[in-house]
């Protein structure tokens, strides 16, 4: 059975909801095992045993979140040259931008020689003030549906042997 690993970090809940929606989408593919793991709890063994990946991060200070970067720092060289060719996609929860977080993950995935199977999905919460930025987030149904589709795409591609 193939495994999809969804690694996420979230401070105010937006990315968590996106990652959970992607996990729900991936779980519709019964032939695929879905693992939804917090970045802080994910290590090289989790990356190695998966067949495809979904990386989900907030954009903080123009970059992926520190906890997500910590995940890549801890795992990058431990799995380098051992996961080449596996499929991945990226989810970013941002206030108003998100492009650089997506670009950073793309660079790391290129180093791992992963195969991108969908463009990064960026959801903007439009929080602008310190108060709204620090508030718990609620991602709308339309965007959660897009995250579900991203999860389903990876899982179905793996199940069918397309990736
Ligand atoms: C310290 C900090 C820095 C942020 N920097 C950015 C940024 O550079 N670009 C952006 O679009 N959003 C930025 N945001 C907004 C977050 O991306 C947004 O609140 C998002 O919902 C965070 O995801 P989360 O709910 O999963 O924590 C920032 C938020 C915080 C707390």
Image (tube, rainbow, N blue to C red):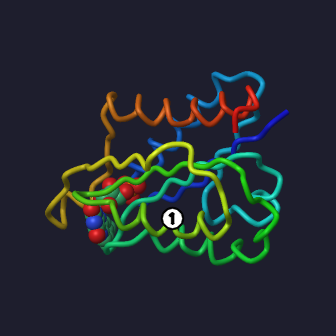
Give the residue displayed 25% in from the left and 49% down from the top. Answer: 125
Q: Is residue 77 above or below residue 161?
A: below
Disc 1 residue lies near ligand 1 with CB under 8 A: no
Q: Is residue 83 above or below residue 156?
A: below
Q: Secondary structure at mark 1?
A: helix
Give the residue displayed 50% in from the left and 43% down from the top. Answer: 118
Quarter holding residue 145: top left
Figure quadrant of the N terminus: top right
Quarter holding residue 114: bottom right
In the displayed structure, does residue 17 sit left or right of residue 71?
left
Q: Viewer-proximal residue, 119 or 68? A: 119
Figure quadrant of the C terminus: top right
Q: Position of residue 158 (x, y in %)?
A: 72, 34
Q: Residues within 10 Å of mark 1 (few under 14, many from 20)?
A: many
Quarter holding residue 71: bottom right
Q: Viewer-proximal residue, 50 or 132? A: 50
Q: Position of residue 73 (x, y in %)?
A: 63, 77
Give the residue displayed 32% in from the left and 60% down from the top. Answer: 98
Q: Is residue 88 above or below residue 103?
A: above
Could one spot residue 64 in this view of the protein? yes
Image quarter for ligand 1 equals bottom left
Q: Position of residue 70 (x, y in %)?
A: 59, 75
Q: Which residue is mark 1?
A: 105
Q: Position of residue 3 (x, y in %)?
A: 76, 40
In the displayed structure, does residue 77 sit left or right of residue 156?
right
């Amino acid at each position: 059975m193939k495994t999809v690993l969804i690694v996420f970090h979230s401070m105010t809940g937006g990315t968590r909801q996106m990652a959970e929606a992607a996990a729900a989408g991936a779980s519709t593919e019964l032939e695929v095992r879905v693992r939804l793991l917090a970045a802080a709890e994910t290590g090289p063994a989790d990356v190695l045993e998966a067949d495809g990946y979904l990386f989900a991060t907030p954009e903080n200070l123009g970059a992926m979140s520190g906890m997500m970067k910590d995940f890549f720092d801890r795992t990058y060289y431990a799995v380098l040259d051992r996961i080449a060719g596996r499929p991945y996609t990226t989810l970013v929860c941002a206030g108003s931008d998100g492009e650089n977080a997506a670009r950073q993950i793309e660079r790391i995935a290129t180093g791992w020689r992963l195969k991108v199977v969908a463009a990064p999905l960026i959801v903007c919460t439009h929080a602008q003030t310190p108060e709204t930025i620090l508030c718990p987030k609620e991602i709308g149904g339309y965007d959660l549906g897009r995250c579900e589709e991203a999860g389903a795409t990876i899982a179905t591609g793996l199940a069918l042997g397309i990736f």
